[in-house]
Amino acid sequence: MAIFWFFAALAAMGVLSCGLQLWSIRSYTKGRVSAAAGHLPPVSILKPLKGLDDNLFDNLESFCKLDYPEYEIIFALQDRNDLAFKVAEKIKRRYPDRGISIVVQRCEEGLNPKVNNLIPAYRKSKHEYILISDSNVCVRKEYLGQIMARMGEPGVGLVTNPVEGVGARSLGSVFENLHLNSFVMGGVCFLDKFMKMPCVIGKSMLLRKADLEAVGGLHGVKDVLAEDYMIGKKIAETGKKVVLCGFPVQTVNHYWSLKRFMNRHTRWGKLRWRIGGARYLTELFLNAVFMSAMPLVILGPSVRTLALALSACILKIAADFYTGETLGSRMNPLLYLLAPVKDMLIGFAWFVPLVSNTVVWRGNRYIIGRDSALSECPETGMAALIYHDSPEYREVNAK
Amino acid sequence: MLLCDFHIHTRYSDGSVGLSRTIDLYGQAGFDVIAITDHVVNSDSLIGKLAHRFRLSVRQDNFEDYMRRIDSEAQRAWNKYGMLVIRGVEISKNYMSSDDSAHMLIVDIKKFIPAGWSYEKIFIEAKRQDALVVACHPHHVSDMSRETLYLWNNREKYARYIDAWEIANRDDVFNVISLKKYRYVANSDFHKPRHLYSWKTLLNCEKDVDSVKNCIRHNKGVAITLFRN
């Protein structure tokens, strides 16, 4: 009986946290800002590219249609043979007057491949304001004006946006978008609103070069995996505000496999475990669906355990559906029925960071240390375990 | 170099993706030239009859609609992506034995060609329409269910009608085409989104239908590449 009530209480807390996250999302989306009428300074948009993202052509093109007086776009690639190069070239040819440059330069200054990609683009950028934007982001034409309006507020050092997943056409993509639009967006908005914790999303970061240089520049984050979070954290530590903008940017996920979904969220879980430490534990306890299933597994099926699991599932489906409606999502309403399945998978994936600290990202394998510090993972299996115990690995984690 | 794929199926036959979405998948990935080549299946065998029963074939009665849709999407693809879309079909002669089965692409087809016709008649009609004839997956493939060996087994008889042979199809590479010094292209045989990542053709020519066909027929400035993310 005690076990049942213990997990029932956790599930209730999980449902409550869903409600709070939903409230946070609503409060952000209600406070949408309009474009500034005042001075709009020129901006350099840095787009690190690697491989084909779903909807890549439209994503890149959306940045060529921004309603903003002066900006340049720099597409950065490590390799001319990258599949994204051809798409970038097509976009450049299509918008010859848009100030588009393509920088192809192999840069191996750090271990974070995205930062390596950004360093040459940053060197080439000519404006004081830089917008770092991932290749899988699609924006509306008012986007840059709106985030610059927030940048113009006193004391602001960095402006970021939550991310909304759209366009799912496979099971993996449905799970990905459900998770981005509930747990990830809710978590970001919740931390910002209630905990006053800057939670920067690398998919959209507007900042000044002077502020970035003051915290060590891109070189200061070249060997961490969560370069976005660390930049935001460092800027907040200088006393400048990190602002979460009132509308999400869209990331299009058409054809994700289940494996890719699980891979990303175990990787992000490892990040949060390494950055948040004990706070990571609360994620499992606040997974209402997973917690409500525990009595069913431990005590077996009964009216009480089934009712608890079913109630949590219904409430979670309703919360995710309502979040989707709040965001104006066009997802088929029936797909929200999959939310409990996704939460169960996420519940199992939660345990992975506790037993593994290697991540595979964009084809590279790393060991992830404190504050997401990266070190090379030369081997897998037993050799990797030996490496975990080596002095150089301990040195990286002691930093 | 133009990044090309001349072997693509949609829901007009047994593809899992509709025509518009297929065009967008290729356009978003930066392709320069593609051909939509849904199956036209013979109906004189059990397999062929089943294909017709489950509407997995372009038929004479919907051929005009198929052509119109491709033309309309081709216009959109050209305007949006600068991508050339060519009309085509895959004539599919399916029998119980792979030795009797053959598939061939008719690229830049203008009028319906029934799969029940004899090989000679199909090839001559394709030539009359100035279409390109490509022998598909002509040798042993990793997926036995797709094996079609008839054209290869009868190559002495039919090679003169064939403009190019698939030297690579999806994940399979056919070195026999190289050994025979036949003209070649490489295609994805696209049925599902994941098939986008497969063997492709690179052409060094202008981006128009006649230049593309001539480039393949003369087989100069043709290369193949494994398109992987």
Image (spheres, coloured by chain):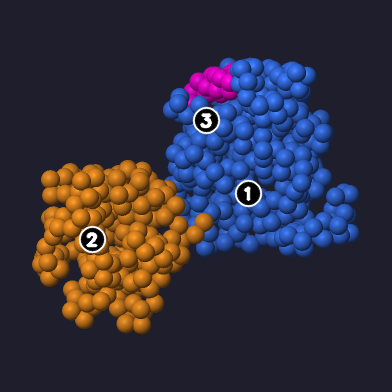
Chain colours: A blue, B orange
In the depicted view, which residue is nearer to us: B22 or A119? B22
In the depicted view, which residue is nearer to us: A118 or B193? B193
In the rendered structure, does residue A318 fall within the stretch colored magenta?
Answer: yes
Gap in angstroms between the C-alphas marked 3 and 1: 44 Å
Residue beneath label 2, please? B94
Q: Determine the chain carrying the residue at label 1.
A: A
Task: Judge whether A343 appears above or below A27 on screen.
Answer: below
Q: For mark 2, give the secondary structure.
A: loop
Q: Earlier in the sequence, mark 3 or mark 1?
A: 1
Residue B211 figure quarter: bottom left
- Does the image show residue A131? no
Residue A304 figure quarter: top right
Task: Judge whether A326 appears above or below B75 on screen.
Answer: above
Gap in angstroms between the C-alphas marked 2 and 3: 40 Å
**Comparing marks 2 and 1, which lies closer to the viewer?**
2
Labels 3 and 1 share a subunit: yes
Labels 2 and 3 share a subunit: no
Residue beneath label 3, please? A338
Q: Please report the bounds of the magenta region as a residue range.
A: A309-330
Q: Position of residue A112 (x, y in %)?
A: 70, 52
Q: Position of residue A229 (x, y in %)?
A: 73, 38
In the depicted view, which residue is nearer to us: B82 or A5? A5
**Residue type at numbered disc 3:** Leu
Q: Are marks 3 and 1 in contact (CB under 8 Å)?
A: no
Residue beneath label 1, please? A125
**Residue type at numbered disc 2:** Asn
- Specify the principal SS of the magenta part: helix
Q: Are marks 2 and 3 in contact (CB under 8 Å)?
A: no
In the depicted view, which residue is nearer to us: A55 or A157? A55
Q: Residue at x 73, y 27 (%)?
A: A285
